[in-house]
Image (spheres, helix red, strand yellow):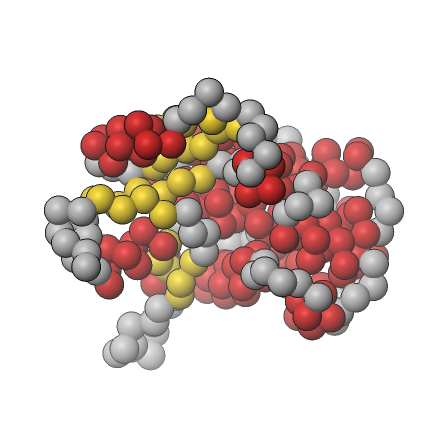
Amino acid sequence: HLRPYHMMIHGTKGLHLQMPEKRSQDFVLNKDCLFTMSELIRKETVVVRVGCMAGPNLASELSLGHPAATVIASPFTEVVAKGKSLLRSDNFQVYGNSDLRGVELCGVLKNIIAIASGILSGLGLGENSRGLLVSRGLVEMIYLGKALGGEISSFVGLAGIGDLVATTTSTNSRNYTIGYKIGKGATLEQALSEMEETAEGVNTIKIVKQLADSQGLKPLITDTLHKILFEGMTAEQGVNYLMRYQGNIDINFL
């Protein structure tokens, strides 16, 4: 049984959207309706000292003992210290971060970009296209992350760009694989039926799209993926749609 004095570190990446039971007619969906896994744990259990594990941690590679690293994020320094002492090894580095919400948002939002990367590969596009996607995808992650309460610094670290690179280039990534199948012509239902594990990015796209619309946010890649997955746009049309969009400046978050 969980006790208030326990510490918990989890590795679950996902978002939960919860509406107030009583809503006024002018209610607008906002970030307070959005819960990360750590926030759900604190809401539904007696545990207070919660942390998460995030970063480029593809399980298939970790099982082979390849050099890797992770981030333990928590506002409680003792949680970070305990995670480091338990997980660090010769082949596995552990870093700390106090921005728990930001780190969890990194792990969630990069799944959206991983699906897009898989679609590019399914369409037979090359590394120039992927470089464009990953760089603009990071900008979109930061744009959304700031709006949802994360810190920019988390997104340019191991849990952000580190995990983004791993999941947008690895065929071991579930979200990349879903995108690849769709790029090859499969419907979302067909792609999901062939998967043995959950691709969290599909549900994340739904949630982020709903929240972005209510807040007047314009996440171009997420919007386009929503059109491809749920509104009948083809993958080819999605790429053409993105390429018609003219951005103003390269970096706008510094």
Name the residue rendered at 19%, 56% in the picture.
2
Mark count = 0
Name the residue rendered at 13%, 51% in the picture.
4
Given residues 179 and 150, the one toward you in this image is: 179
Given residues 248 and 129, the one toward you in this image is: 129
Q: Can residue 99 be seen in this view?
A: no
Q: Position of residue 111 (x, y in %)?
A: 57, 50
Determine which quarter of the picture holds residue 103. Answer: top left
Name the residue rendered at 25%, 36% in the picture.
79
Q: Is residue 109 visible?
A: yes
Determine which quarter of the picture holds residue 125. Answer: top right
Q: Position of residue 82 (x, y in %)?
A: 26, 32
Q: Quadrant of the N terminus?
A: bottom left
Name the residue rendered at 33%, 79% in the picture.
25
In the rendered view, tell whether residue 192 sits above or below residue 24.
above
Q: In this view, does 180 lie to the left or right of 201?
A: right
In the rendered view, tell whether residue 238 sits above or below residue 104.
below
